[in-house]
Image (cartoon, rainbow, N blue to C red):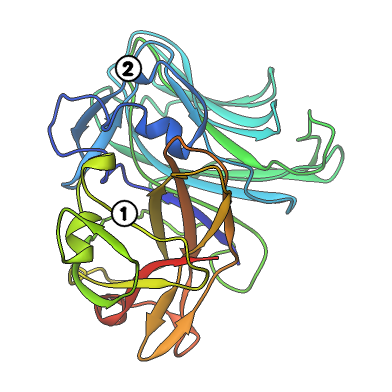
Amino acid sequence: MALLWVEGFECFGTTIGNDPLPFGAIARKYLNVANETNMVMQTGRIGGFALLMPNAATFTTPSLTTNDTLICGCAFRNLGGVDYSLVILFDGGTKNINVRWEDGTGELDIWRGNTLLETTSGLALSTDVWYYLELKAKTNNSTGSYDVELAGVSIFSASGIDTQDGSNAYSDNVRFFGATSQPQWDDIYICDASGSINNDFLGNSKVVAIAPDGDDTANWGTSTPNASHYANVDENPSDDDTSYVEENTTNATDLYDYEAAPSLGTVHGLQINTMCRETDVTPFSLITPIESNGTQDDDSAQAISTTSFTTIVRVSEEDPDISAPWTDSTISAAKFGIKVG
């Protein structure tokens, strides 16, 4: 699989100007989260929502890959006032290739760690304008490479160079920074170069969200306060323990119908986000099943070992029934859910 992560900030509440909700929701999904109380939900670049990140707020993806090539696309808008990092590829906690905004000139830089490699000339990006940036970097001390595109046009490119500051010949996570210039983020994707699809730039991309709207196979024993299971897991934002489903029997499965997907065009993949927690002292695992045309496909069980809420993620590039990329119609017909591992 090459598609590793997507984020559109569509499931952290629906009120512009609010913090992401519920409190600490970003930290339930991401690592090295700082100043989450300063983050603010904003109108997305093409409808939906975006995340404003002032005052040195940060969030980092989990470790995603050990492939030597990591690719990230994201939409950003900046109000100006300070230089800051846009996208940073990390090996653990060590910076590798990263792209930075130069305030006052609207130019972009590319760095290896804290070593400047290139600066654009005449790019002169404007503040308060959405741009779509894509970065691809192969991490290696001598055979590394990088490519950066803005709106599909190359602005940086080099090969046969040192792109590695960490101890490993790969970057496994991506960090996004805030600043006093109040950058906003939207429509993020992350891939690596493995697999036969989604292993290069995906181009300008948009992330949308759909929610459960019906029960298909509801086998979890506790559903509160609603008898309909889906109605306890469809909130945006999550209402945590106000409504939920609960089960402790191995292989018990809840599958839900979902809202129809909008007209999407090319679909690179989908991501299922499940917010969950332990309710007793017995650790358990959670599987995220997908059912398409009667074919159920289970991912590997993910251990849930905390009584605090956490978000687990499953990424799917293909419809498991036909082993072909998803379309808006096959997504609309599929069922997604939860299964005790």
Can the viewer see residue 200 in this picture?
Answer: no
Helix, strand, or loop for circle 1? loop
Q: Could you tell me residue 270's position as x and y percent?
A: 40, 64
Vertical order, 130 against 246 (above or below): above
Instruction: Label 2, secondary structure: give it.
Output: helix
Q: Quadrant of the C terminus?
A: bottom right
* Rendered image quadrant of residue 273: bottom left
- Measured as percent of width and height from the top left, residue 150 is found at 43, 42
- Above or below, comparing residue 90 to residue 326 in the picture: above
Is 279 on the left-hand or right-hand side of 41?
right
94 is higher (above) or lower (below) than 63 = above
279 displayed left or right of 39: right
Give the alpha-carbon distance from disc 1 to disc 2, as whole Å: 24 Å
Indicate left or right for 21 with 319 as reference: left
Residue 308 visible in the current orientation: yes
Q: Residue at x 58, y 41 (%)?
A: 62
Name which residue lies at 40% across and 14% down.
179
Number of numbered discs visible in the structure rendering: 2
Pick whichever of labels 1 and 2 is earlier in the sequence. Answer: 2
| Residue at x 38% of width, y 77% of height | 326
Closer to us: 93 or 158: 93
Q: Amino acid at mark 2?
A: Thr
Amino acid on which the number 1 mark rests in the picture: Val
Occupied quadrant, residue 269 = bottom left
Q: Give x and y (percent) for residue 235.
A: 19, 49
The mark found on residue 207 in the picture is 1
Which labelled disc corresponds to residue 21? none
Mark 2, residue position = 37
Mark 1 neighbour density, 10 Å: few (under 14) some (14–19) many (20 or more): many
Frontmost of labels 1 and 2 is 2
Quarter in which the N terminus is drawn: bottom right
Q: Which residue occupies the foreground of this view, 41 or 114?
A: 41
